Image (cartoon, rainbow, N blue to C red):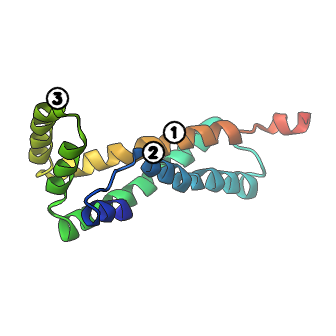
Amino acid sequence: MIVMVNMMYSDTHFKGNDVVGYAAMIILFSLIFFGVKNHRDKQLRGYISFGKAFKMGSLIALVGATLYVVVWLFYYYLFVPDFIDVYTDYVLTTCAPEDIETKTAQMADFKEMYKNPLFVILITYSEVLPVGLVVALVSALLLKRKQFEKSLS
């Protein structure tokens, strides 16, 4: 997050890449898989239900998302308080000419909402937490193992 924001500030020709951002989140959230697997293998003697694995993965995702939100809040308010203006310029220079009027109105609304710290928190959680929950779901599906499943193999 910090690297991409700094790139947007330092490079006027920066082309944001959501794929890179979400790929980085998936790579970081892949630690959920290893956390659940480690817990299953070391504390639960190799067995874990889907529900317990998903709950544990979701809690790890929530902790990671909370850290992301806290870092963004400090970074935004202390180091890049003009981020919305820079982001608005970026959006308006990268959108199609026929969309400029609509995008200008949308970004003005977004800027107004971003004045509320609660909105900043909610929007930041909404960027990252769903990715973590998807990784937690996939991890739970891959790692679930009931006691009788192991004895059959």
- Of callouts 2 and 1, the N-terminal one: 2
Instruction: Say which element carries label 3.
Output: helix
Which residue is located at x 9 percent, y 36 percent? 105
Element under disc 1: helix
In the displayed structure, does residue 25 sit left or right of residue 16? right
**Along the viewing direction, whichever of 59 and 30 lies nearer the viewer:** 30
Question: In the image, which disc is placed on residue 98?
Answer: 3
Q: In the figure, residue 127 lies in which quadrant?
A: top left
Alpha carbons under labels 2 and 1: distance apart: 16 Å
Instruction: Give the residue type that dot 2 points to.
Output: Val
Q: Position of residue 120 (x, y in %)?
A: 22, 51
Residue 64 x/y as whole percent: 45, 56
Q: Is residue 94 visible?
A: yes
Q: Nearer the viewer, mark 3 or mark 2?
A: 3
Mark 2 and mark 3 in contact (Cβ < 8 Å)?
no
- SS assignment at label 2: helix
Disc 1 designates what residue?
134
**Left or right, 145 with reference to 86:** right
- Looking at this view, name the residue that lies furthest to the top: 98
Name the residue beneath numbered marker 2: 19
Q: Amino acid at mark 3?
A: Glu
x then y, percent, for residue 78 = 20, 70
Q: Earlier in the sequence, mark 3 or mark 2?
A: 2
